[in-house]
Amino acid sequence: MQDRTPTRRTISLVVLAAALILLLLVAPDVLLVVFAGILFAVFFGGGGGWIARKTGMPRPLGIGLFILLIVIALAAAMLGFAPAMAEQFDQLTKEIPAAFQSLRDRVEQYSWGKRVTDAIDPSSLMSSESGLAAASAVTGTFGALGNFVIMLFIGIYGALNPGLYRSGVLALLAPSLRPRADEVMDKAGNTLRSWLTAQLMAMTAVGVLTGLGLWLIGIPLAFILGLIAGLLAFIPNIGPVLAAVPGILLAFPEGQSTVLMVLGVYVAVQALESYILTPLIQQEKVSLPPAVIITSQLLLGVLFGILGLAMATPLAAVGMTLIGALYVDDYLEQERA
């Protein structure tokens, strides 16, 4: 008679899956924060590991030096550019309302425009409901800062001693599963490393090209608009659209031709990034179908807000890697002919 008692392999997988499902149900945001921390760990570990290999110093010292260089670079940038950035950001916050009013005046020239502008009347912002929303936004800001600090610490600790956490995950699996799990974690780590490298290079290119293009056509605040475009390029497809909004609003008072030129800069940079820069940088290491990216962004954005939207693409990359390794290779491809 065949023994139908569950094996340790099966039980270990069920326990791990049950723990993940429980976290998804009880505290899904925690998993997103941890995953963002893992991205920081990959970033710190990659940069610090490169320094360690080039200098021959121990890996922890290389990571520490890499983090120190980042802090020095940020401090230098703040000292050198903070006054100009603060001035441009202050000017941006002052000019956006005027640009929005100019757009509103143009829209109200049409019969349907009055109904649209009444529906988004700024006076409604003074209502009690909006006051509650503002208080919630302030609370959310402090929560976001706290989450960012947690991500940084997860990243630092994960980069300094990745083997400790890796062995902890492997210990939850049956011994016969550990070699394969170790290989899959290697694949997932390589996927994240390749994606993050490509994304950082693309973000830098988008920020520089957008700022330069807007400066060449005489748009004010080109530096801060380029910085916004570079940061939002972290979110493929949706980020560039959001980045174009302030630039287009600032161009409205200058006339239709200026608006078209600004729109042309954003479209040209996005096309260059999407069809030339990103494919060349990634070199097919992390190839994600656009439909998968958009679907994951829509799903995680609806479920978890801005953090889910930001983490959608790297999560999709890791998810496809895991599906390919664990489901396709280890299950489907094992079918006997």
Image (cartoon, rainbow, N blue to C red):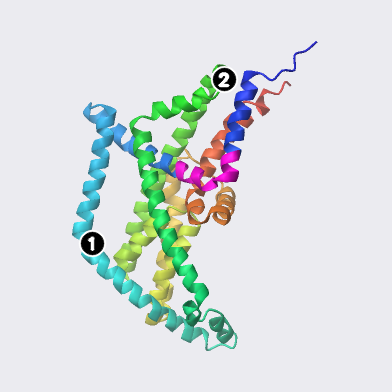
Q: Quadrant of residue 164?
A: top left
The reply, left or right, for residue 192 in relation to residue 2 is: left
The reply, left or right, for residue 51 in relation to residue 331 is: left
- What residue sits 42% from the left and 72% below the top? 248
Residue pointed to by mark 2: 174
Decide whether residue 111 is among the magenta residues.
no
Give the crowd class for mark 1: few <14, some 14-19, many >=20 residues within 10 Å: some
Residue pointed to by mark 1: 82
SS at mark 2?
Answer: loop
* Residue 77 sits above or below residue 252 on the image: above
Residue 37 visible in the shown view: yes
**Range shown magenta:** 22-35
- In this view, the mark in front (1 or 2): 2
Instruction: Mark 1 or mark 2: name the one nearer the start of the chain.
Output: 1
- What residue sits 48% from the left and 80% below the top? 122
The dot on residue 153 is none
Q: Quadrant of residue 247?
A: bottom left
Q: CA distance from mark 1 to mark 2?
A: 53 Å
Residue 51 visible in the shown view: no
Q: Residue 67's spot in the image, x, y percent?
A: 27, 41
Q: Residue furthest top?
A: 1
Q: Residue 169's spot in the image, x, y percent?
A: 49, 28
Amino acid on which disc 2 is placed: Ala
